Structure formats: C-alpha cells, structure tokens
Image: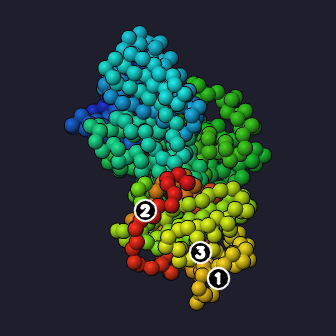
Amino acid sequence: MAELVRPTHFWVPEHVDTYGPQVADLCRLAKFEPDPEQQMGLDAIFAVDEADKVAALEAAVVVGRQNMKTGLFKMATIGWLFLLDQRLVVWSAHEFRTSQEAFRDMEELIMGTPQFAKRVKQIHRGNGDEAIELFDDRRLIFKARTKSGGRGLSGDKIILDEGFALQPSHMGSLFPTLAARPDPQVVYGSSAGKVESGVLRAIRDRGRTGGDPSLAYIEYCAPPPKEACADGENCTHARDVQGCGCDNMELIKAANPAIGRRITVSYVRGERRALPPAEFARERMGWWDDPIGSEVPIKPAEWTACLDEESRRTGSVALAVDITPDRSVSSIAISGRRADGLVHGEVIEHRAGTGWVVDRIVELFKTVQPTPVALVIDPAGPAGSLEKKLLEKGFSTDKELLPGAWRLHFMGSREYAQACGALADDIANGEFRHIGQAPLDTAVEGVATRPLAEAWAWSRGKSGATIAPLVAVTLARHGHATFGVTEPVAPFALFGKGR
C-alpha cells in the first residue's frame, strides 16, 4: 500500500468515531480503493460526535488537480447514499461541464457495481437536471452554480467543487436553508485560490489556524516562495530563474500526493514548460494568488452577513457612477436608508462602454421618486470625463441649486478616503445591506486598497477584479449620507437581484 503523504495543513474537530473505514469498504465493492490521503479525508468527513452527528459542518480539501479531490468526493457520495441513507446529496461546480463530468463518473461507478445498481430507480439526464434517484426516493443531483446566487443547492450533504469561484451570494443563499436539515454538511474542494477567491480564502484562514469546532481542513502546498525560492518573494518563477522552488521536485511532491501514482514526474516537468509560471505556481505548488496588501479589506463573512435579497430602500437616494480605467465597463449605483435605518446599496446598471451612461443617469433623475439628492463622481477617476456632458444636461456643482437643477458632487481625495472607510465600517458593523449581485460580489472579493493621505481608498490598479460596482456603491452611500433627507416615503424598488 502506498505511504501517506501528510498534508501541509490539517485539522479535524473533536470527535468520538468515524464512518470513514466503512465507507472505504463500500468503495472497495466497486473496486474503488482509496489512496491513503483519500482515506484520511473520508475519516475527517465522516467523523461523528457523541450524538452520532457529523463533527464537521464544513470540510474543505485544497490541493492541485488530479490529486485526490474528485475521487474523495465520489467515495463520500457512495457513503452518504449507501451507508448513511442520506435523503438528498447535491454535487455542485462552478462550470456546467464540471458538474456533467461528475454526473457521468458517478453514473458509471454506481451502475457498474451490482450492489449499488439494483437500488437505482431512475437516472435523469436532462440538460442541467442530471440526477440519480434511488427506489426509496433518495437522490443525488448535480448542479452548476449560477453567478448570482446559490438557490437550489440545499440538501443534506452538499459538495461545492471548484471552491475558488465561490461568491458570498452562494454562501448567503445556501447556509440559512441548512438549518432545518437533521445532520447537514458542506464539503468544499478546490485548488489554491485566485485573487478573487475571497470566500475560499476565509475558509483557508480558518483551517490553517486550526481549532475551528465545525471545520475539517486538509491542504497540500509547498512552503511559500520566501522559503522555497533563492530570490524569496521577489522570485518571478520563470523557467530560467536559478533556485526557483517551482523546479524543486521534492517540494512539488509535497504539494501533490498523487505524484508517482496518477501523476508522473515527466508530466509535471512538461507542465512546467507549458504553463505560465504563475499558473504552475498556483496549481502545482499550491501558492495562492492573494490580493496585494496585508489584509482583505472586506471580510467575506462580513459581506455575507450583510446579504438581504429582499432589501429595499425607503425614502431619498443618491446615485453614483464609476468607469473602469480602460473604459470598457461602467456602473451606476444607488444608496439610501431602509425603513429599519440600515444603509441599502445596489448596483442598478453594469454595462459595457460609456456611451449610454449620461442618458441613463438623466433618465433616472427624471423617473426615480423622490428625485435623487445627488449624483456623486470621483473626478480623479475615469468618470470625471463626464462632467461637461452632465452640466449640459442640467446638472450643477453649485452649493445652492437653481430651481430644476440636479446636484452633481465631485469628491475630493480626502473625502473619497472617508467614503471608503465609512462603507467598510458599515459592512464590518452589520449596518449595510446588499441584495447579492454578481458584479458587486466579484468587486468585493477582488478589491485591494492603496494609501491615501493618512487613510486608504479602493485601488483600481491593484485590485484583482473590476471594482467599478463597489466604487459606485461607495460614492452613492457617501452622497446620501451627505445630502440625503430623513423623511421616509413609500418603498420604491428599482431593479431586482442580479443586475
């Protein structure tokens, strides 16, 4: 039997027993023998407490592709269906193709094993509705996650594959639905995270710290570049760099337990020649693409806690617009107060180009009731170029507005820093609400900051995502805080979720 390659980071909550060995025995009926690392994963996932409930509400496995994740999930699914008799198992992935491949693998595994196949009532092969149904109405369903949320993912046991693409809206939609399940569990699988992998990064930080009473965590990765490379953190990982950790096969093996089994050394060396250095470093070394800066400015858990898909503002609002540096995308946002006094922020337009922006803003000022108290722009940003056209359309930067004029407010740099800090505080303190929109979620996950005077502000240049939606919400929130009125009127919802 192969020797266990110990993970770089490992934690399992306190437990009294595990069904892992029994699950492995079931898998052997299908001639599906666990690797030592997969057995370790089964023992962690199927660990139970004194009440015979799962010890880990969440379990995460972070390792490069083709090492152990998919096989482990297939084994866990066999255990859930045929040992523990779970009613509903959901296997989800970021891409439709990945969920389809998982369906085909599980169909082949189950139908190729007589002891399992005889319990299958029906196999559903609809496009996007793939499922395996057993005679006692237990089901295994496969879903691709939508960008806007995680509706339809609820089940007794849930696999969230391709965890690097998880968004706060997925978590906000999923976890409240698990409360009524008798023994729920969510299992994450991913290779090392990207810049925008805020949700997975938060799970990583909990797992690496250890001690979490409800999270089992397994991660394989090489020592960080500052230890693995001769040039430390300055290493470019290019193929001609002497002393780069990406060329150290012992480090690569430590991050890839399947080398020598399913993955050959010659293939990995070919990957090194074929892949861009950053991609090889992430996939084979397990080195994360972390945002520039020491901390993530908006913690995923705090952003998720601010999700309310039914949130609506009541009363006055302010609008704001921001444009990406390459002027490829523009975002318009609105902000106001809810009836309970919390701040509501929403992206109401997020479209390609800039030619539509001024006319759309004018339309909103004519139709939204009450009339927005201000349009806010960062003049140092790309949207500052809209000034002339907006003034021609009836906007004014005067402190005292003439009748019929609309307020246009240009923020100074100090004011912009204050606006960024104020929104971050609202989010951290639970005083902000959003409806779970993919462009805004992505901006929050990938945003980085830059120093500004003695404070900080969002950085368009350093961020790992398009942050125009977040900048627009930040400016709109500041505009309403500065110019808004407090008298409530009847709620008015502009746009729904997902815009």
Give the x, y percent position of residue 421. 51, 73
The numbered dot on residue 375 is: 3
Q: Secondary structure at mark 2?
A: loop
Residue appearing at x 55%, y 67% in the figure? 367
Q: Secondary structure at mark 3?
A: strand
User: Is residue 354 visible in this depiction of the protein?
Assistant: yes
Residue appearing at x 46%, y 33% in the figure? 91
Closer-to-camera residue (199/55): 199
Residue reaching furthest right? 240
466 above or below 61? Answer: below
Locate residue 446: give its quadrant: bottom right
Give the x, y percent position of residue 493. 47, 61
367 above or below 440? Answer: below
**Label 3 vs 1, first from the N-terminus:** 3
Label 3 with label 1: CB-CB less than 8 Å: no
Closer-to-camera residue (182/307): 307
**Label 1 vs 2, first from the N-terminus:** 2
Indicate the colouring scheme: rainbow
Residue reaching furthest left? 51
Q: Residues within 10 Å of mark 2 (few under 14, many from 20)?
A: many
Amino acid type, label 2: Arg
Closer-to-camera residue (238/88): 88
Q: Residues within 10 Å of mark 3 (few under 14, many from 20)?
A: many
The quarter in which the C terminus is drawn is bottom right
Give the x, y percent position of residue 308. 41, 57
Give the x, y percent position of residue 107. 48, 19
The numbered dot on residue 396 is: 1
Residue bearing mark 2: 312
Residue appearing at x 41%, y 27% in the figure? 140
Locate residue 179: give its quadrant: top left
Amino acid type, label 1: Ser
